[in-house]
Image: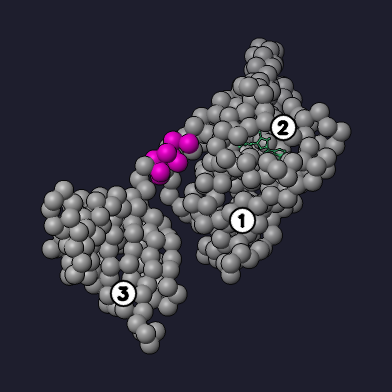
Amino acid sequence: MSRMRIDNVDIKEADIFEILLDNFPDMIHSIDDDGKIVYTNLTAEKLLGYKREELLGMNIRQIYAPEVLKAVEKGFTDLKKRGDKTVESLLCAKDGTRIPVEIRSFSIYDDTGRFLRTFSILRDIRPIKELQQSLVHAGRLAAIGELASGVAHDINNPLTVILLSNEMLVRHLEALASSSKELERVINYAKDIQRASHSIQKLADHLRSFSRGMVEKAEPLDLYASINDAIFITKSKITKTGTIVNNHTEPGKYFVCACPNNIEQVFVNIIGNACDAMEGREKRQLDISISPAERKGVKMWKCDITDTGTGIPPQIREEIFQSFFTTKEKGKGTGLGLSISRAIVRDHKGEIELVSEMGKGSTFSVLLPSIEPPK
Ligand code: ADP
């Protein structure tokens, strides 16, 4: 064993590696063919709350959250075959705390190619997740502001109907001379009031559900509903810019497993941007369609949102997805919409693709893994 001297202290090289690994900010472990932990560093103790002696000998499956065990099993099998892998997963500490982690793993083999061990570096990504959540929240707040002014505008029409119908109702009630014709008219006014009130209720409901908590559960979701809700929310922008929307989607076909409010937010951002890009242009047309697609062997639904706007210069096509990148004037753009949208879609194991032609327009495609329609 080679030795070196540090400050006149004789240290074995192996100790130096041990010190380095123990002070590494990420958790490191090595596991054998059965998943038994055969090495772990000090960071793992701190992160998981187990003593190193406890961890050594434990099975890797015991430190993961139960809901990710199936994925862990598959990941472990793949890793043994393929050699290296980077995934996100969820650990479960001794006290039950859930810790989201990014795991980089690789396997080593003997001369005959027989699997020996895996080594993994696990980074605690709670700070990143929290930042992502606050970005989602910030974007949501910006969208709510826009939505609220739209709601104020949209509430005006049904409110005018309510007020007018009410006035007529009072007048006719006063003139009600027990004639059945008069009665029929009164009933019709009452129905108008009912319809207009429902319209207000729907707007208010939307505002409430859109601004509700950020942490949502993924559930089977028909993208048709998300698209229609997003069109509903962006209605005032669509009307203001005089955009014609051709929605080619149909209900009951495009199911994904997703958080409804988050996906709706993605479509709200993309449709809102498309309207902005078409403002003042001669042709203002938004085409929305959904078709099946496949990426890396995964079956997806691909939702294309095509505008006839300015187009996006090739040199900024990647930049527009970065936080705080905006070409809009002060007070109009936050530069958060697309970065948040991409984070949301990637969180759902999907992707946003972009095709754009200067002077002609752009297509933003939201790809999400498809699921079977719920029974
Ligand atoms: P913001 O809308 O606040 O600027 P985004 O992240 O949503 O932030 O968009 C970033 C930039 O991407 C916009 O400022 C705009 O320059 C560009 N962009 C997004 N969508 C389109 C589009 N459909 N057509 C042209 N440019 C677009």
Distance between the Cα atoms at labels 3 and 2?
54 Å
Q: Which residue carries the number 1 mark?
A: 367
Magenta highlight range = 128-135
On the rendered image, what quadrant is the N terminus found in?
A: bottom left
What residue is rendered at 58% in x and 29% in y?
A: 334
Q: Is residue 115 left or right of residue 177?
A: left
> 167 or 272: which is nearer to us?
272
130 or 215: nearer the viewer: 130
Residue bearing mark 3: 117
Residue 232 position by quadrant: top right
Residue at 75% in and 47% down: 356
Residue 146 position in % (x across, y down): 60, 27
Residue 274 rendering spot, x and y as whole percentages: 71, 38
Separation (CA) of disc 1 from disc 3: 36 Å
**Residue to which mark 2 is pinned:** 276
Residue 234 placed where, x, y %? Answer: 65, 34
Disc 1 versus disc 3: nearer the observer: 3
Secondary structure under badge 2? helix
Q: Earlier in the sequence, mark 1 or mark 3?
A: 3
Please, which residue is most extreme toward the bottom here? Answer: 112
Residue 131 drawn in magenta: yes
Residue 289 in the image: state x and y as whole percent: 72, 53
Q: Where is 184 relative to 112, above or below?
A: above
Which element type, helix, strand or loop, lies under badge 3? Answer: strand
Q: Is mark 2 within 8 Å of ligand 1?
A: yes
Q: What amino acid type should be assigned to the residue bearing mark 2?
A: Asp
Q: CA distance from mark 1 to mark 2?
A: 23 Å
* Ligand 1 placement by image quarter: top right
Q: Is residue 88 left or right of residue 140?
A: left
Q: Is residue 228 magenta?
A: no
